[in-house]
Image (tube, helix red, strand yellow):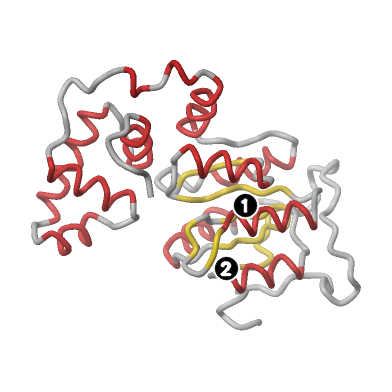
Amino acid sequence: MTSPQFADRVLGDGVGQDGDNDAIDSADELEMIRVAIIEDDPATIDLLRSAIEPAENIEIAAVARNFMTGVKLIAAGGYDVLLCDLGLPDGSGIALIRESATRYPAADVIVITIFADQAKVLDSIKAGARGYLLKDEQFADCVEGIREIRRGGSPISPIIARQLLLQIHPASRAASMPLKEGLSPRELEILNLLARGFSNVEIGELISISKLTVGTHVKNIYRKLEVNSRSEAVFEASSRGIMNAH
């Protein structure tokens, strides 16, 4: 087993020793799909493991927990699908996506992130990502997403697909439709903290209110923005110019 900062499971079959880093041919759907993960949040890694490890013909080949070890993971190769976070503490996930796409064009990249703002979506796709899943969705869906992308599809969260459509038809942006009820200063404060990835408990500690009060504010934010998740809320607010997505 390698250092816990780099990988939880050794890249298999001598990859990195014989120089053959090419991704496997996806024509045979029964062939094992090797997945690599670059993600700094331990809880997210655990959720991905619990979803992927029981799946038939999918295995986790390696896990990296920051940008620098992600660089080493990509250099070692030996994966067919890379699940990559954008918000790494020491570097840009987009740079890692670009490096993977350049080195191994036959391997697929799926972005896993809390970010839903348009610039990051487009930059990720331009860098070579072929799928985009948000962290506040059910990670059980990532297994089908992995299989879909190896079949030539592009698993994309609905809110991401909407952003791409807005890029094509900018006149239809939500910004042209004012909110029926505006966000209060406190709701804006909480929304910005949500966009930065803080939990309700953490937000309560930061602004000295209870987590139940935070939850009430979050429900009001969702209602006013007419959304159902944190990612949708950040996207809607950003699209309307209410806040800058982080």
Question: Quick one: SS at disc 2?
Answer: helix
Numbered disc in front, either 1 or 2: 2
Rendered location of residue 186, percent (x, y) = 12, 45
Rendered location of residue 83, percent (x, y) = 60, 54
Q: Mark 2 points at which residue?
A: 67
User: Are the residues flagged by discs 1 and 2 in contact, CB closer than 8 Å?
Assistant: no
At x 65%, y 35%, the residue is 154
At x 22%, y 54%, the residue is 200
Choose between 14 and 186: the one closer to the eye.
186
Choose between 47 and 38: the one closer to the eye.
38
> From the image, which quarter does the N terminus lie in?
bottom right
Rendered location of residue 199, percent (x, y) = 27, 56
Rendered location of residue 136, percent (x, y) = 40, 46
Q: Name the residue under label 1.
A: 55
- For the image, the number of numbered tags is 2
The kind of residue on which mark 2 rests is Phe
Vertical arrangement, residue 7 with respect to residue 166, above or below: below
Q: Distance between the residues labelled 1 and 2?
A: 27 Å
Question: Quick one: SS at disc 1?
Answer: loop
